[in-house]
Amino acid sequence: MAKASIYLTCKKCGEEFWHGKKCYNSSDARNYEDWAKENVDTCPKCWKADQDVKKLAEREKQSAENEKSATECPWTLPKLEGSEKQIKWANDIRNNLIAQMISSKAKFDALEAVTKGDIPEGMSEVTAQAIKEFYSDVHNKSSKWWIDNRGKCFFGETFEIGRGMR
Ligand SMILES: [Zn+2]
């Protein structure tokens, strides 16, 4: 075993940084150092900052897409309540759920039927009840509630309950 070890200059912040890698032997290590001189041009700090910017952009793109899909939802959902920051976050969570919900037309149709009191054939009582609860959850206007429940994939689960829709 040998170790490539080299100091490089970051093209972003201009600072010198250390770069190392374990290699099989010293000639490998030297080859790697030559390669790194040409190819590793960003320090770990700037690299991480780049990744964060990319992730944020990705999240914002996703939010915008969800928001667009959510406008296709025929329901009038209440205005969310909470602090500005909470509302923004909760709205994003809700849009994501709505986007999921309307992307499956069969499920959405069944959901609408149940909420109008028309339980599709073969659907269990338990599933119908879960769907009713889901419908009322979606109309929850507390941002805090949305944020607290963000980990639940409750749209999918609703339909799994009682295996009514499988
Ligand atoms: Zn840097």
Image: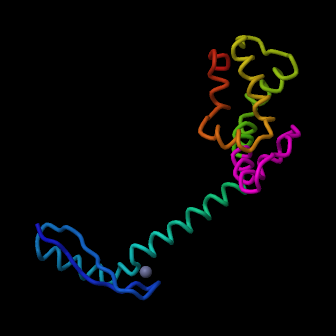
Residue span colored magenta: 67-95
The quarter of the rendering in which ligand 1 is drawn is bottom left
Residue at (35, 79) in percent of width and height: 39
Which part of the image, by quadrant, shows the C terminus? Answer: top right
Residue 142 vs residue 29, the one in the foreground: 142
Determine the residue located farthest toward the front in the rendered image. Answer: 83
Q: Position of residue 124 (x, y in %)?
A: 70, 11
The answer to which image quadrant residue 24 occupies is bottom left
Residue 26 vs residue 84, the one in the foreground: 84
The verdict on residue 3 being magenta is: no
Q: Position of residue 17 (x, y in %)?
A: 33, 81
Which part of the image, by quadrant, shows the N terminus? Answer: bottom left
Judged left or right of residue 45, residue 104 is: right
Judged left or right of residue 119, residue 155 is: left
Residue 57 vs residue 45, the one in the foreground: 45
Residue at (72, 13) in percent of width and height: 123
Judged left or right of residue 56, residue 97 is: right
Residue at (72, 51) in percent of width and height: 86
Residue at (23, 70) in percent of width and height: 21
State whether residue 64 is above or below residue 107. Answer: below
